Image (spheres, rainbow, N blue to C red):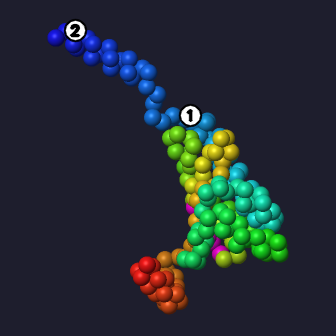
Amino acid sequence: MKKIIYVLVISFVALTACTEPATKKYTKAQKAEIITKIDTLLNQWHRSAADALHQDYIQAMSKDGVYIGTDASENWTRDEFEVFSKPYFDKNKTWDFKTLTRNIYVGDDGKYAWFDELLDTKLGVCRGSGVVYDENGKWEIKHYVLSIAVPNENLDKIIPINKGKDSLIIQQYRNE
């Protein structure tokens, strides 16, 4: 019996010593460095839009990236969004989002992060949120959602305005 316990203990120790941890834990300094890189990426991305630098703007997104706009119909792949946005950039009729505040959260593996931000825009205060990914040392936007921030006390005014269009969208998706 002692031999069996001894073999089991040695096997367990050998297995755990040779096994990599599932996720790498980062120090505060390493996480702060990642957050700075992501913050810089997002600031440059917004600046590229304001400066009508279309290729810089689009290339900040991953090839399989998604952009979701404020209208329910606006759910684009990066390639679709590139086509949609190009005329605005060509005419210098782009958007200039100024970050009011931003939160960035880094996953334990240091490859993914997610964020939310409040933006000063021509639409008023908007919220951006998304997911970014470290692709071989280069952070890219995988998923971005832009929404108009509506104060709760204004919802009673907004709901009737949206009701007609919303009912069409609801009907469309229920019929699919």
Q: Identify the residue at horizontal 65%, vertical 54% (top origin).
A: 62
Q: Identify the residue at horizontal 77%, vertical 58% (top origin).
A: 56
Secondary structure under the numbered disc 2 in the rendered image: helix
Q: Which residue is mark 2?
A: 3
**Where 23 sits versus 37, above or below?**
above
Label 1 crowd bin: few (<14), some (14–19), many (20+), radius 10 Å: few
Q: Is residue 169 visible?
A: yes
Secondary structure under the numbered disc 1 in the rendered image: loop
Secondary structure mostly seen in magenta is strand
**Where 25 sits versus 86, above or below?**
above
Image x and y of residue 85, in percent: 72, 71
**Where 12 sits versus 84, above or below?**
above
Image x and y of residue 31, in percent: 59, 40
Q: Amino acid at mark 2?
A: Lys
**Where 22 sits versus 75, above or below?**
above
Q: Identify the residue at horizontal 58%, vertical 70% (top origin).
A: 75
Image x and y of residue 117, in percent: 60, 61
Q: Seen from this angle, which residue lies furthest front?
A: 176
Choose top left, top right, bottom left or bottom right for residue 121: bottom right
Image x and y of residue 102, in percent: 61, 57
Q: Amino acid at mark 1?
A: Thr
Label 2 crowd bin: few (<14), some (14–19), many (20+), radius 10 Å: few
Q: Identify the residue at horizontal 56%, vertical 41% (top origin).
A: 110
Q: Is residue 120 one of those drawn in magenta? A: no
Q: How far apart, in angstroms, are the residues tagged by discs 2 and 1?
A: 42 Å
- Between 120 and 53, the one lying in front of the other is 53
Q: Which residue is mark 1?
A: 27
- Between 118 and 18, the one lying in front of the other is 18
Q: Is residue 118 visible?
A: no
**Quadrant assignment for the C terminus:** bottom left
Image: magenta residue range: 124-129
Q: Seen from this angle, which residue lies furthest top?
A: 3
